Image: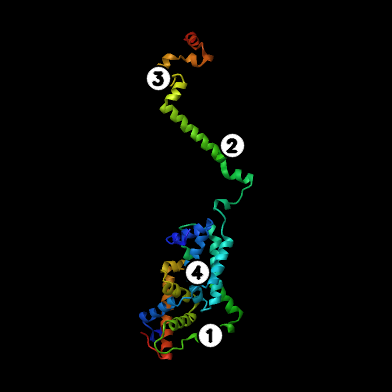
Amino acid sequence: MTRTDKPMLDDKALDAFFDAARRESPQTSDALVAAILDDAAAHRPQGSIMSDAPILRSDDARAARGIWGDLVAAIGGWPALAGMATATVAGLWIGIAAPTEVEALSGGLIAGTEISLAADLYALEDLTPGYLNIDILLEDEG
Amino acid sequence: MALDAYAEATDDALLVLYGNGDPMAAELLTRRLAPRVLGYGTRLLGGDRAEAEDVTQEAMLRLWKIAPEWRTGEAKVSTWLFRVVSNLCTDRLRKRRTVDIDAIEEPTDDAPAAVDGMIQADRAVALQSALNNLPERQRMAVTLRHIEGMANPEIAQIMDISTEAVESLTARGKKALAIALADQREELGYDTD
């Protein structure tokens, strides 16, 4: 390396040049900023990214959503599914909590205190008139 | 919403906001990034301010266009932008060489006139003159490392080379600058601090 023989600035002296360059950096003009912001406005997506998603044709959409997507679509989409979920939760709650209003309407059938009481009050034949002679049939077979 | 509300947001977050249609985010990104990009482009293009402004506008335009597809966390916005600027400047420098080499101003013509007690502006001009004589990749690496203050791994991403290659480029570039500026000092008869 012949260049090592040449005079060189040391790091401190060289840093002074780098520091000067940083301080003398060109400033963006108002015209440049305006031009950049004009471009930004021209290319700014409108609304959310979701609304900019490409629109699928019906065949493409069906292929893309798969079996579960088809099932959801068949019952009316996500709003219908939400309604079903609400009804399911409400049913579960009524079953577990057995509020007094429901108890009254059911004539005590689902009374929360004594389940055996309901069994005493209502025989299976009372609830399933189509199987009135089930005891007889069972006796015959037995 | 006032710009102050976005002051703490990262470049990444601002670009996503712009991609969601927020105009304020574009303004803040421009204020943050355009001056840095302009300075870097000007140095790579040998001090040609007008051409550097074109490059800055073009690079920012590419940023706006990619915003809706931007994936947060994959790359820093500034790294991506400096890479675009580097490529744009490389293309322009290549065209300069092929179009008319005589039309390019001799970089040594920019040597400072002052001899005693070089002021800051003269130092900046002298450094630009010395940078102009470096090979393009060395100029790029030295500018990013010593003027933009970037770390070697980030420079490696911008230049699409290894960190070791960055170290080599900056070391050789810095040495060449130290010699060039020392030569200039002797010729002009001034002393450093």
Q: Pointer 4: what residue?
A: B34
Callout 4 touching callout 1 (CB < 8 Å):
no
Q: CA distance from mark 4 to mark 1?
A: 28 Å
Q: Give, as a three-letter code, the residue at label 2.
A: Ala
Does mark 4 fall on the same chain as mark 3?
no
Does mark 3 fall on the same chain as mark 2?
yes
Does residue B191 appear to the left or right of B94 in the view shown? left
Q: Which mark is residue B106?
A: 1
Q: Give, as a three-letter code, the residue at label 3.
A: Ile
Does residue A104 appear to the left or right of B93 in the view shown? left
> Of circles 3 and 1, which is in front?
3
Residue B74 can be seen in this image: no
Which sits in the foreground, A29 or A138?
Answer: A29
Q: Which mark is residue A115?
A: 3
The residue shown at (47%, 15%) is: A124
Query: Which type of secondary structure does the marked residue at label 4 adopt?
Result: helix
Q: Pointer 2: what residue?
A: A74
Does mark 2 fall on the same chain as mark 4?
no
Query: Which type of secondary structure does the marked residue at label 1 adopt?
Result: loop
Would you call the spot at circle 1 few (<14 residues within 10 Å), some (14-19), or many (20 or more)?
Answer: few
